[in-house]
C-alpha cells in the first residue's frame, strides 16, 4: 500500500515512512492510493472478532510494511480491557467500545433506535485514546527497528494533548512538545496534561486559540530543514496513523448495533477538526453500510455551513467562539482536505487551488461546480448546537435515560435527533466522559458528574507548563534548547 499527498507534489511512500511525520513535504495530507474494499464475506467473518483482532484485520489492509505477526502483537498489546477499563456502569470493558442503547428501537434490527458508542473508556477518558494508544506502540516499534528518535510537536484543543502524552510518556526515543490554548481548556483537561512530570513531556500554553497553536505546528512542519534536523513528528489528526486507527471503531460500532450485514446505520459525530468523521467517511468508502454520517458542530459551525451551503469559510481566531464544548472550538478543520480530495475526484490540482484560497485567508464555494452535486453521494448531513442546546440535551438525556453525557456528545445527540429516521438506528459517537467538563455539567444538572476511580484528586496535583506568545520562532527556540539537552 502506497500513500500519496492530497497536493500531488510529494513522492508516494509506505506507511512506516509517513507514520512519524504529519504533513507531506508539499503541505498536503497523506491518503492511501486506493481504499481497500470490504466484501460481504469480510463483514461476516469480522462480526464476531474481538476488538484487537478486528483492528488487525482492518489495519493490515492499510499497513503492509510491518510483518503481520508484529502488527497483530501491537494490536493485542493496545486493545485490552485493562487499558480501556473506565466503562459506564453496566458496560463490558472486554468490548473496548461498548454500545449503550438509550432507546432500543423496533425489533431485532433496532429500527429507529438511538445509541451511544462508548469511545472514552481509555486512560484519559476521551475518544482520542482509541487511536493514540495504538500510535504510541507503533511509534516505539518503528523507532526501535530503525534506531531513531522523534520529537513530536502537536496542538490540542483539549483531548488530543492528554491522549498523546499518556500514550507517549516514558516511551524511549520520543519527546512530546504539546501546544494548547492558554486558559481555554477545562480544569480537568489542563490537569491531565500539566500534571505529568515525565522527562519526555513538555507542555506549552500559547496565548491564543487552538487555531493559532495548529498554525504554529503547520509552520514548523513546513520548515523542512528544521523538521529534518530536529526530527519533528506529529500526532495530531493530520497524522494518517490516527485516522486509520479510528476506522476500526466504526466497524466495531456497526457490529455492536446490528445483527446482520445487510443492515444500514446512521452515525452522528461531534466534529471540530474533521479527523474523527473523516475515518467514518473512509469506512463508508470501504463498504461499511453507513447510510448517513451526521456531522455535528458547536457554535463554530464552519463544517455545518459547508454541508448545508457548499461554502467552506474558515474563521479567524477573533471570530472563533469560546464554548462549553471546547475541543470543537476550531474554525479551520485540518482533516477536511482529505475529504475534499475525494470529493473532487482525487485531483490534486483542484485541491491546491482551493487551499491556496483558504491559506490566503479566504474561502471557497463549490456551488456552480460539478462537486456540489457530487457532495450528496457521500452521505453527509449536518447541524449545529448552542450552549443552551447543550444544557437541554444533557438534562433531557439524564432525565429520560439516567445517562450523563459530556458537552461534545450532547452536541452529537442534539444533531442526531434532528436527523433521526425510523428506518435505521443511529449511533452517536461518545467523545469524552462528562467529568472532563464538570462546570457545564453542574450548570445543567446541579450535580457532580460521575468520576472514575483513579481521578479523584487530579486537579490538586502539581502542574508544569510553559506559557508563551503565539510565535513560531519562540517555539522553535524552546525545541532547540530541549532537544540539545
Image (spheres, rainbow, N blue to C red):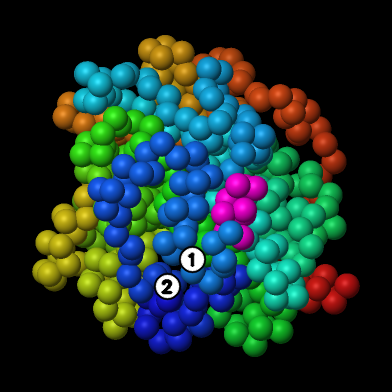
Quote the CA–CA distance across marks 2 and 1: 7 Å
356 lies left or right of 19: left
- The reply to whether the magenta stretch includes residue 26 is no
Picture quadrant of residue 392: top left
Q: Is residue 205 visible?
A: no
Horizontal and vertical percent for residue 229?
71, 84
Q: Secondary structure beneath disc 1?
A: loop
Residue found 61% across the figure and 76% down from its top: 220
Q: Residue at x 45, y 40 (%)?
A: 49
User: Depth check: 47 or 342 in front?
Assistant: 47
Asked if the residue under mark 1 is in contact with the one under mark 2, i.e. CB atoms within 8 Å, the reply is yes
Looking at the image, residue 409 lies above or below residue 352: above
Find disc 2 in the rendering and name its residue: 1
Q: Answer with left or right where residue 9 lies relative to residue 137.
A: left
Q: Which residue is mark 1?
A: 63
- Residue that protrudes farthest toward the right in the picture: 485
Q: Image quadrant for the N terminus?
A: bottom left
**Residue 198: percent from the left, percent from the top?**
83, 53
Residue 309 position, x and y percent, is 20, 55
Counting other residues with Cα less than 10 Å from the Cα at mark 2, is it few (<14), some (14-19), or many (20 or more)?
some
10 Å crowding of disc 1: few (<14), some (14-19), many (20+):
many
Residue plotted at (31% across, 76% down)? 351
Magenta span: 70-78
Amino acid at each position: 500500500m502506497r500513500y500519496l499527498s492530497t497536493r500531488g507534489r510529494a513522492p508516494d511512500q509506505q506507511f512506516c515512512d509517513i507514520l512519524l511525520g504529519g504533513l507531506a513535504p508539499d503541505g498536503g495530507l497523506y491518503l492511501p492510493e486506493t481504499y481497500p474494499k470490504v466484501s460481504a464475506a469480510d463483514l461476516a467473518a469480522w462480526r464476531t472478532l474481538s476488538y484487537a483482532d478486528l483492528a488487525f484485520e482492518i489495519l493490515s489492509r492499510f499497513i503492509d510494511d510491518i510483518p503481520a505477526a508484529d502488527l497483530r502483537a501491537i494490536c493485542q498489546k493496545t486493545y485490552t480491557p485493562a487499558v480501556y477499563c473506565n466503562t459506564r456502569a453496566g458496560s463490558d470493558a472486554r468490548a473496548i467500545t461498548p454500545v449503550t442503547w438509550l432507546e432500543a428501537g423496533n425489533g431485532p434490527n433496532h429500527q429507529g433506535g438511538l445509541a451511544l458508542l462508548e469511545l472514552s473508556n481509555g486512560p484519559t477518558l476521551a475518544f482520542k485514546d482509541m487511536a493514540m494508544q495504538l500510535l504510541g506502540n507503533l511509534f516505539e516499534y518503528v523507532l526501535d527497528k530503525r534506531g531513531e528518535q522523534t520529537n513530536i510537536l502537536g496542538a490540542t484543543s483539549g483531548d488530543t494533548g492528554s491522549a498523546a502524552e499518556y500514550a507517549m510518556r516514558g516511551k524511549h526515543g520520543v519527546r512530546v512538545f504539546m501546544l494548547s490554548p492558554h486558559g481555554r481548556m477545562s480544569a480537568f483537561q489542563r490537569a491531565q496534561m500539566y500534571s505529568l512530570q515525565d522527562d519526555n513531556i513538555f507542555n506549552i500554553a500559547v496565548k491564543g486559540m487552538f487555531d493559532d497553536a495548529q498554525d504554529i505546528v503547520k509552520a514548523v512542519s513546513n520548515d523542512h530543514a528544521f523538521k529534518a534536523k530536529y526530527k519533528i513528528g506529529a500526532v495530531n489528526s493530520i497524522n494518517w496513523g490516527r485516522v486509520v486507527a479510528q476506522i476500526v471503531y466504526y466497524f466495531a460500532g456497526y457490529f455492536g448495533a446490528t445483527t446482520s450485514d445487510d443492515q444500514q446505520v446512521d452515525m452522528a459525530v461531534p466534529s471540530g477538526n474533521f479527523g474523527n468523521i473523516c475515518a467514518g467517511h473512509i469506512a463508508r468508502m470501504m463498504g461499511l453500510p453507513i447510510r448517513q454520517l451526521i456531522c455535528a458542530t458547536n457554535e463554530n459551525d464552519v463544517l455545518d455551513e459547508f454541508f448545508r451551503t457548499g461554502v467552506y469559510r474558515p474563521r479567524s481566531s477573533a471570530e472563533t467562539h469560546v464554548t462549553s464544548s471546547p475541543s470543537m472550538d476550531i474554525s479551520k478543520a485540518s482533516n477536511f482536505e482529505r475529504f475534499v480530495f475525494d470529493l473532487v475526484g482525487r485531483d490534486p490540482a483542484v485541491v491546491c487551488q482551493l487551499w491556496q484560497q483558504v491559506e490566503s485567508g479566504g474561502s471557497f464555494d463549490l456551488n456552480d461546480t460539478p462537486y456540489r452535486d457530487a457532495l450528496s453521494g457521500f452521505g453527509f448531513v449536518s447541524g449545529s448546537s448552542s450552549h443552551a442546546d447543550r444544557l437541554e440535551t444533557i438534562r433531557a438525556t439524564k432525565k429520560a435515560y439516567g445517562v450523563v453525557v459530556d458537552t461534545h456528545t450532547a452536541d452529537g445527540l442534539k444533531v442526531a435527533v434532528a436527523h433521526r429516521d425510523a428506518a435505521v438506528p443511529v449511533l452517536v459517537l461518545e467523545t469524552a466522559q462528562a467529568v472532563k467538563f464538570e462546570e457545564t455539567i453542574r450548570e445543567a444538572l446541579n450535580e457532580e458528574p460521575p468520576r472514575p476511580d483513579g481521578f479523584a484528586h487530579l486537579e490538586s496535583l502539581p502542574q508544569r507548563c510553559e506559557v508563551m506568545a503565539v510565535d513560531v520562532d519562540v517555539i522553535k527556540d524552546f525545541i532547540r534548547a530541549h532537544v540539545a539537552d
